[in-house]
Amino acid sequence: MATADFPRLYARTRRFTLGIPSAFRVAPDGQRVVFLRTRDGGDPASCLWQLDLSTGQETLLADPAALLGIEPGAAPPDELARQVSRRPAWGITSYRTDLAVRHACFAVAGRLWVADLDDIARPASQRIREVTVQESASAPSLDPAGTQVAYVSAGSVRIMSLADGRDRELAASDDADVTFGQADPAALLGDRGLWWAPDGSRLLLARVDTSPVQQYWISDPADPQAEPVQVRYPKVGTPNADVSLWLTALDGGRVAVEWDRRAFEYLVAVTWDGHGPLVAVQSRDQRQLHVLAVDPATGRTSVRFRDTDSTWISLVPGVPRYTASGALVWACDRGSARRLIVDGEPVTPDDLQVHEVLDVDGDVVLFAASHDQPDIQLWTYSTGGGLDRVSTEPGVHGGGRAGGTTIIARQSLAQPGTTVVVRRAGAPDCPIASLAESPGLDLRIELLRVGERQLRSALLLPSWHRPGTPPLPVLVDSYGGAAQRVVLAQTPSYLVSQWFAEHGFAVISTDGRGTPGRDPGWERATRGDIATPVLQDQVAALHAIAGQHQGVLDLHRVAIRGWSFGGFLAALAVLRRPDIFHAAIAGAPVTDQRLYNAHFKERYLGHPDSEPENYDRCSLLDDAPNLRRPLMLIHGLADDNVVPAHTLRLSAALLRAGKPHEVLLLPGVTHAPLQPEIAENLLLVQLDFLTRRLANQD
């Protein structure tokens, strides 16, 4: 594929995420795997599939286009347009199964379907049926026996009997700001808000009251007749949503789960299995956390695990959980490592960093962890067998496990996309096909550790570059915040960096202080200042790499680009180090730290009332008079994560200071520009800016 074709392919494939299997659910007997995947690498409609391990055959169970009566590959109906603008795929983006994984339920466009997963002899078209609901349905969840489904409608929870179709209200919302049973952006509930008891006799429901939360209004200046959209946004220093949990019987009677909600206002995790409900709650300053066992009859709680930290407590996905024997599984920072904790004791060594707990199968815990930051492997722990490394090849791994069957999903530098295999004792590995398209670019990448801090960095050069050719202009393409960029995988960010490299740049990406995966102290080094150490590490890596690769990097022509925190970093670089950085592209930058989300930002900078100097130190608005390099600001006008006010305020400050700059505003675009035409042309616009602005630097 020609380099010129890459932006269109990148946009059409939603950053090469389409066609990759995900959301695996293994049947308890280990013989079937249910998963989501689009039909191919260019179709954004996510479908429900099943793999029969006895035959190796994959079956398409449900295609949302067919269910809605539209042509495959066609644009989704109007009511899904908002979903499509925010997610790479539309359609069946999540599903729930019963305990035996014999049935699955999901919602598309407010309609509810149930699929029979067990009777593989029948055609797929006969194994799925639509369940008629009185109102629009979302977030459906089957009871453990698969006989009834709870779902959310207009902020209330309803229950449908699959035997007779009886549909009744279980928990009613009597206020527009109150919802039951659903995740809410103003609360920390992940992707769900209701949990069934293992015997199906009751549910645990989240009640979220967003009335205390500050209102934002997101408007569309390109359509002045359109009404603004109200968004409840818990900005730093302002009230959060009032979140409570209610044990709710099927007759509607309910009791509250009791904990000190003033001292622990963040509800961060909920699970419920045969050993009872578990709830994790965190204090506003994020320095205290309790894991609570809940009495399902009375709602009273007892503390199963306490964690405190003088800086902050990091949250690890996938916990708390119980093993089959009742041991509590948690993960937290102990000394120099993020460690797996079983019944209060660390069971992983102090040189292994736990990233995520993926599954608990009986007494076996499957988790992802790394000895070295770029290489993330799968491990298991059990009380009888101790630690065991599951994956063997270099790369970034994920997966799942049930019934002794393990799913291993691997990304690597050696090949594009994701390879997925299902592993069972005494049987050959069974693949789950990835249908993602090839990016058509060969990565020319070198992973490095540079400088006194051994900064993990990646250097990407053009495929045509040879020793002795003139030095290349440099593009720093780092994120810099709470996400790893330097990994052993052909990630979309690497592919974009390589595309820029093919146009004549030496591209550098560095994970400096503040990025996860290395050790807890490395992440906490940015407490109180997310600007100075982050920028220092980018400069140090740039100089160290230039020193190691004499004659390759032209330090008189250095640009930086980034999005979100990376956009903040890019603008920060040209405002505070114009001696190093000669041009910048800042996409959706957080320019005023006081405008951002409370839970995320207060973790690093504290409460703005008690530590205002941290927010002043990291704001870009006061730096506006310092601009003397070309700067392009890009922002989606429908962004409800980093609201457009960030870019508009910085632009206004630059204008008041008489500093020329470029601003590109994107009507209808949220925080991630996924619309194909926009995503494609954004790359071309950035390339044009960098080429123009670095042409004549001093």
Image (spheres, rainbow, N blue to C red):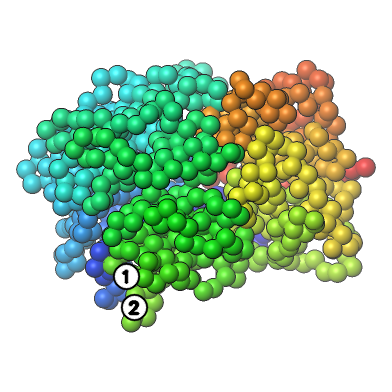
Can you say whether 187 is above or below 517 in the image? above
- Quarter the C terminus occupies: top right
Amino acid type indicated by mark 1: Gly
Residue at 38%, 28% (x, y): give it: 261
**For residue 123, which quarter of the picture?**
bottom left
Asked if residue 500 can be seen in this view, the reply is no
Asked if residue 300 can be seen in this view, the reply is yes
**Element carrying mark 1:** loop
- Compare residues 273 and 45 and report the one nearer the observer: 273
Residue at 69%, 47% (x, y): give it: 513
- The residue at which mark 2 appears reads as 425
- The residue at which mark 1 appears reads as 404
Instruction: Give neighbour class at mark 1: few <14, some 14-19, many 20+ (Cα, 10 Å).
Output: some
Instruction: Find the distance from the CA under tag 2 to the CA under tag 1.
Output: 8 Å
- Image coordinates for residue 612, horizontal then vertical, percent: 66, 23
Amino acid type indicated by mark 2: Ala
- Which of the numbered marks, if any, corresponds to residue 146? none
- Compare residues 24 and 348 and report the one nearer the observer: 348
Can you say whether 17 is above or below 167 in the image? below
How many numbered dots are placed on residues in this image?
Answer: 2
- Image coordinates for residue 288, horizontal then vertical, percent: 49, 37
